[in-house]
Image (cartoon, rainbow, N blue to C red):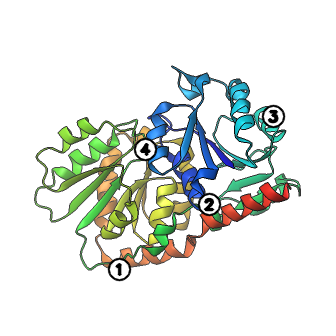
Amino acid sequence: MIIFRADGSNKIGAGHIMRCMTIADAFPDKERVLFVTCSEDSVPLINARGYKAVVLKTYEGKEAAEVPIDKELKEFKAVLSENKPSFIMVDSYRVTDSYLVELGKICTVGYIDDVGEHKYPVKLLLNYNAFASYDKLDELYETDTMVLVGPDYVPIRKEFKKAKFEIRDEVRNVLILTGGGDAYGLTGKFVAKFGSVLDSDVTYHVVSGFYADEEALKQAAAGFKNIKLYKNVKNIWNLMSTCDLAISAGGTTVYELMALGIPVVGYTFADNQHPLMNYIARKRVFPTCGDYRDKGDELIEDVATGLKELFDKEKREKISHVEKTIITGSGAENIRDAIKYCAYKNV
């Protein structure tokens, strides 16, 4: 059995759980995969993908950030004892070395690291970011840790490789994505901005996060004929491929858009989104507009300006080509193979 330890909430978002589920999808038997999380709120999201979930009672009535992760070890070890996994993949910014060492006494442990500044005591280290330095991480880790670095390991669902996208002459459909949590209410702000463009022939397809306030968004979009709201989109690749442009915060979703070759206008609202967007800006892959926490509602205007510039077909063609040269789309399968090697060879 493979166990994924990941959390999601309105504050955390759904990114950790979503990317772990994409890795899990590469394994053939869903019954041999278990998710362990801190909140009941994440269970419907996990179950909808066909996976079982265990909620740790250590966090009952509390936010994950309020509880040191080592406090869960006694309860988590009981879950491990019952299920006897061959591998644990941990995806949390709250990890400590002592926590990972304790898990490593039970079975092989892997860790998803978005920063690449610390040496974690694990057998498999995954940092799939395009900006990650293999030389730096290879130097940081000993030979007994398998290090997976760079965009060849971006976990992209297999459906994205099958979906077809083409650059059209005119922009008629724009996709707006704000992440799983939307703690700053950006979805509603984008709805208000683009819904008020009454003379536009463009339809804006707004995907709200799993933890977003759906009723509030429906009220915000009421009366706007050019706004379509979505939530819990199961086949997001189909919706993406019907759109001409996308507005997205930094995260795994950006990699999915790039795998399809969909031109993006990017922005951030969390610290962990900065490295990717900084890389995108340095490489001039697509326009980036900064962080909402720094710019406030000025960001919304900057995104609208950046979007308008990409109505030029030649610019969209160039961006699409560059995006597809960066992301291969085989990352989940590559990670799966590495996990199987580590788990069964017990490196």
**Which quarter of the figure has residue 136?**
bottom right
Disc sitting over residue 27 in the figure: 2
Inspect this view and state whether residue 297 appears: yes
**Label 1: few (<14), some (14–19) or many (≥20) C-alpha neighbours in 10 Å:** few
Nearest to N terminus: mark 1 or mark 3:
3
The residue labelled by disc 4 is 180
Q: Nearer the viewer, residue 290 or 77?
A: 77
Inspect this view and state whether residue 285 appears: no
Q: Nearer the viewer, mark 1 or mark 3?
A: 3
Q: Nearer the viewer, mark 3 or mark 2?
A: 2
The residue labelled by disc 3 is 102
The residue labelled by disc 1 is 314
Secondary element at tag 1: helix
User: Looking at the image, which residue is at 38% across and 45% down?
Assistant: 209
* Cα separation between marks 1 and 4: 32 Å
User: Looking at the image, which residue is at 24% across and 75% down?
Assistant: 170
* Cα separation between marks 4 and 2: 24 Å
Give amino acid for label 2: Phe
Residue contact between numbered discs 3 and 2, judged by CB atoms under 8 Å = no
Secondary element at tag 4: loop
Give amino acid for label 1: Glu
Nearest to N terminus: mark 1 or mark 4:
4
